[in-house]
Image (cartoon, helix red, strand yellow):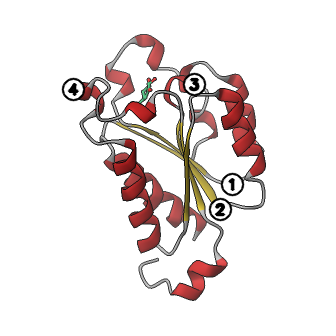
């Protein structure tokens, strides 16, 4: 992938990076758990990683579940894969899981914290059965790893 040309990038559909509720507060929200980097830092890292691999990136964050579902529906035929940190919806939302199937593209699930080291209610994910991979506990570097894996899967 590292020898991708600008022409390859132009032909490829972009990767969609989605962040769910409360992730707009990264940087100030429980920094001992989520770190001091902001959502802007996440998007910058993701854009740089995608560009290095020859992909464009569309990034969006919302605190509104219906908005997230609409974005996923609207992405059909327009993206090559999804990297998502569903935030709290990870553990609660059948509707989000149902929507994520619609685009028919590979999905990588990211959690900044190690959810398995935390409360029991964070141990279950409705998204994981749909995901090609799950990354948790690597801080915001997890987004970079997810994009690298997605690029490998897309080829
Ligand atoms: C982010 C959240 O907002 C929580 O609801 C999840 C996840 C964990 C994270 O680690 O990025 O439980």
Say what secondary structure mark 1 lies in. Answer: loop
Circles 4, 1 touching at the beta carbon (< 8 Å): no
- Secondary structure of the residue carrying tag 3 is helix
Camera-nearest residue between 68 and 50: 68
Query: Disc 4 and disc 1: Cα gap in Å?
Result: 34 Å
x, y percent for residue 67 = 69, 35
The x, y position of residue 93, in whole percent, is: 65, 22
Q: In the displayed image of the protein, which residue is found farthest to the top?
A: 120
The quarter of the picture where residue 92 lies is top right
Q: Which mark is residue 105?
A: 1
Kindly tell me whether mark 3's CB lies below 8 Å from ligand 1.
yes
Q: Earlier in the sequence, mark 4 or mark 1?
A: 4
Quarter of the figure with residue 120: top left
Residue drawn at the location 35% of the way across and 34% of the way down: 26
Identify which residue, 152 or 39, lies in the foreground. 39
Kindly identify which residue carries mark 3: 89
Residue 61 in percent (x, y) is at: 54, 40
């Amino acid at each position: 992938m590292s020898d991708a040309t600008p022409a390859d990038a132009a032909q490829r559909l972009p990767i969609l990076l989605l962040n769910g509720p409360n992730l707009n507060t990264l940087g100030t929200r429980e920094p001992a758990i989520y770190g001091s980097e902001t959502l802007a830092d996440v998007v910058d890292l993701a854009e740089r990683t995608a560009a290095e691999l020859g992909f464009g990136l569309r990034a969006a964050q919302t605190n509104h579940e219906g908005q997230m579902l609409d974005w996923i529906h609207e992405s059909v035929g327009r993206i090559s894969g999804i990297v998502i940190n569903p935030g709290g919806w990870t553990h609660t939302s059948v509707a989000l899981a149902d929507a994520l199937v619609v685009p028919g593209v590979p999905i990588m699930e990211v959690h900044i914290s190690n959810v398995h080291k935390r409360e029991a209610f964070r141990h279950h994910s409705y998204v994981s059965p749909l995901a090609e991979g799950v990354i948790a506990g690597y801080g915001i570097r997890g987004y970079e790893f997810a994009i690298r894996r997605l690029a490998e899967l897309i080829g």
